[in-house]
Image (spheres, rainbow, N blue to C red):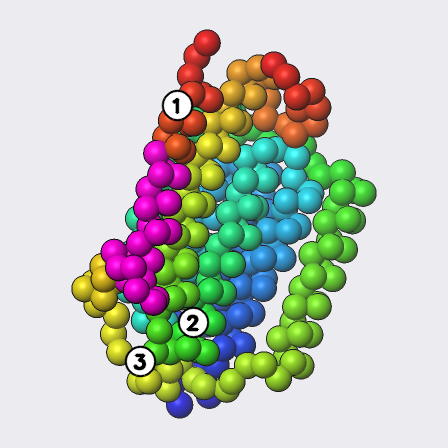
């Protein structure tokens, strides 16, 4: 049995995520679509907090809702006039998109609700089975080479970010 | 009433379907990138949910999501650099204007 406050929080965040994802892809004004995406990302961060991953929620807000959204807003400001509307969707593209997403959703939901691969633990039970994740553990997991420790991917990511910085500067510079 | 794993997977499915729909229908490259972010975000959320509900004692899904967020940030930065470059060359950010692979 979960606390009522958790259930209410779940419903609020789930509705926010559902509504704003639809609006993010349906809005014809691109800056508004980016703003709706921001709300979806913040809702996801709240889910992370609720599931007990505080560090991950912080990273989601800092990197996604902070960094990536700033990139989006700057890119939109550089390439669009204010209050510019995109053209209405072509009907055959709309049909293809609707068919693909509806079929995908129906298949996924069918698989979720019929296949018996998922246990029925509630959030409270899961949270009570685990311990709170401390920064110490996360640091150990990132800098160790034992089992369940991830030094090599961590270093690979750092090289990737360096390549990304150089690539971004090289691609977008004036020539 | 229990908040089980299915409850959390349903918003993720909705997010993914919206991303697929937007990626197919939109013609603006930045709007397509926004749809891509929705898809990536739903995948990240799935990692965390499966980690929490199926393996509550470990935190590997969380670490995988951290790496995925870093890669998504890098990918978005490069994609936006490319889009701005295309805007300089073509004059708009429509995907239909990019049919020659040279500048």
Residue placed at 36% from the left, 30% from the top? A165
Is residue A85 visible in the rendered image? The answer is yes
Residue assigned mark 3: A130
How crowded pointer 2 is (Cα within 10 Å; few <14, some 14-19, many 20+) is rated as some
The picture quadrant where one finds residue B95 is top right
Which residue sits furthest top? A175
Q: CA distance from mark 3 to mark 1?
A: 44 Å
Taking the image as shown, residue B14 lies to the left or right of residue B4, namely right
Please say if A155 is above or below A173: below
Magenta span has A17?
no
Q: Residue B51: which disc?
A: 2
* Both labels 3 and 1 in a single chain: yes
Magenta span has A147?
yes
Residues marked 3 and 2 touching at CB (< 8 Å): no
The location of residue B4, given as percent across then percent down, is 48, 81
The picture quadrant where one finds residue A110 is bottom right
């Amino acid at each position: 049995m979960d606390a009522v406050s958790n259930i209410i929080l779940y419903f609020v965040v789930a509705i926010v995520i559902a509504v704003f994802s639809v609006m993010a892809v349906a809005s014809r004004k691109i800056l508004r679509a980016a703003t709706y995406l921001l709300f979806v990302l913040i809702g996801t961060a709240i889910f992370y907090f609720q599931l007990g991953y505080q560090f991950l929620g912080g990273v989601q807000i800092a990197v996604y809702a902070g960094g990536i959204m700033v990139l989006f807003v700057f890119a939109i400001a550089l390439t669009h006039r204010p209050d510019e509307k995109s053209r209405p969707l072509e009907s055959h593209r709309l049909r293809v998109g609707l068919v693909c997403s509806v079929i995908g959703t129906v298949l996924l939901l069918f698989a979720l609700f019929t296949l018996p691969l998922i246990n029925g633990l509630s959030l409270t039970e899961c949270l009570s089975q685990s311990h709170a994740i401390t920064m110490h553990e996360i640091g150990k997991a990132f800098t160790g080479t034992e089992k369940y420790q991830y030094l090599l991917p961590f270093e690979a990511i750092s090289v990737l970010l360096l390549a990304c910085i150089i690539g971004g500067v090289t691609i977008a510079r004036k020539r | 009433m229990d908040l089980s794993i299915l409850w959390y997977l349903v918003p993720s499915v909705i997010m993914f379907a919206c991303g697929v729909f937007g990626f197919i229908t939109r013609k603006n490259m930045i709007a397509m990138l926004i749809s891509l972010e929705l898809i990536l975000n739903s995948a990240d959320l799935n990692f965390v949910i499966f980690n929490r509900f199926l393996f509550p004692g470990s935190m590997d899904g969380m670490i995988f999501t951290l790496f995925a967020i870093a890669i998504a940030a890098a990918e978005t930065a490069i994609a936006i650099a490319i889009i701005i470059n295309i805007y300089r060359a073509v004059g708009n950010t429509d995907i239909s204007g990019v049919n020659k692979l040279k500048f």
